[in-house]
Image (tube, helix red, strand yellow):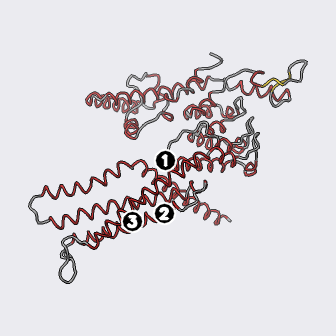
Amino acid sequence: MNGLTCLHLLALMPSAFPSTSRMGRLKKFIYSCLPSIPEDEDDEDEDELGSKNQIAISRMFTAIWKRITEGLEWPKMEEIWKEKRNHAFSKRLVKLLVTQDVSWNASFLAQDITISIGLGQGRKAEGTSEVIPLDKTLSSPETPLIMAARTGIKEIVYEILKEYPEAVDHVSENEQNILHVAIMHRNEKIFNLIQKKVINLHRFASKIDHNGYTILHHVADMTYYHATRPGPAFQLQEELEWSKRVKEIMPNHYDIHRNKNNMTAEKLFEEKHKEKLNDAKKWVKKVASSCSVVAVLVASVVFAAAYTVPGGTNKRGLPNFLDSSLFLVFTIMDVISLASSFTSLVMFLSILTSPLKMKDFRVTLPQILTIGFTFLFISVITTMITFAVSLFLILRHMDKRWTLSLVFISSLIPVLVFAAMHFRLYAQFMETLKENFKENVLKNLYRKKNKKTN
């Protein structure tokens, strides 16, 4: 089939491997719990599986899960189990095929022909000065390594680099090596694997393809970009972070390199991400405006509650429930809510007055959004607690407990709805804050280490 081997075909099947299979949190948890070794394993595989005791434990574990699956009568679990077993078979098949695959040799043969002829693009046709492209000089498909890097199948890339480290030198017909392909397709797992497995990474990072693209130019190209984060602002941040990671391994003097269209990587990035930047600006301003309105509303409510205390005041102007512990809780929650709402308001207003430059979307704006949204969420929670405590103070002498329970539940409903509606966005906020915190900590540790060594 056009020179394609079984390993080529496996490299085009991302659903057959766990690294490229999309799973939700629940499915991923069930997947990790289920055994992958089939219950009818042949005895000839004993060396691979380990000792007989390990085999016995594995089969017992499989039998237990089989009984659980049959007892629950949940078809979805059976599907997940079947998928995991298929993944296990696929990984074993890859190990077998990699040891027998030599398709990558064609790449070196083609490169040797090019070098021996002395041309960078192919050979001369007889009797003319026309240069025949290399892909017409020697027709061969891409190697499984390049295909797997393109589809993001980490298992195939790992096995090939483990068995044939020299295969990493293969380039595609566009003169793109495995690093170019992984970066172009945003395959972070492949990128991380290359950093660990490839010894002379600097040599691969300095390669330029037939369009004059460095690895940083491929970051700018959004042809194969697929959004994985919610909101244009965080999607732009993801691209800026990817650009920063790639730039760290690229030679410094390549920053001024221009492609065939006379564009540097930075200029190309700005050009290709212009629409994404405009969408991010609109999204950030819309979120900041909406959250500012909510923050002002919460601040108004809790500010008014501070002067209309539950139970009223006596002739001296002191609250009637001043000696109650519940009143102390009411006061504390009211103050926290007021402070949190004003803090979030200040954060969101700073976004509205910001110039919103491209570089701000990597660290500054996501941090401000995260802090502002966190304080807004705290203000909503404390406001509802303040509301519940004030009703408890007024109705605490009532005999009907169900009334108090209803008050407590009703006070939690807005918080739960707010959390459920914005959970994914808030999770991204916290993930961004955690990543930035880790990055700053690592930078400080690296600086301290350098100071000690110097």
Which is closer to the viewer, label 2 or label 3? 2
Three-letter amino acid code at disc 2? Leu
Compared with residue 378, is residue 68 higher up or lower down, i.e. above or below? above
Q: Circle 3: is it few (<14), some (14-19), or many (20+) Cα within 10 Å?
A: many
- N-term-proximal mark, 2 vs 3: 3
Label drawn at residue 349: 2
Label drawn at residue 231: 1
Q: Position of residue 144 (x, y in %)?
A: 62, 27
Q: Does residue 27 appear to the left or right of 271 in the view shown?
A: left
Disc 3 designates what residue? 340
Compared with residue 209, is residue 389 higher up or lower down, i.e. above or below? below
Residue 362 in which image quadrant: bottom right
Q: Position of residue 383 (x, y in %)?
A: 30, 63
Q: Secondary structure at mark 1?
A: loop
Label drawn at residue 335: none
Q: Does residue 280 appear to the left or right of 392 in the view shown?
A: right
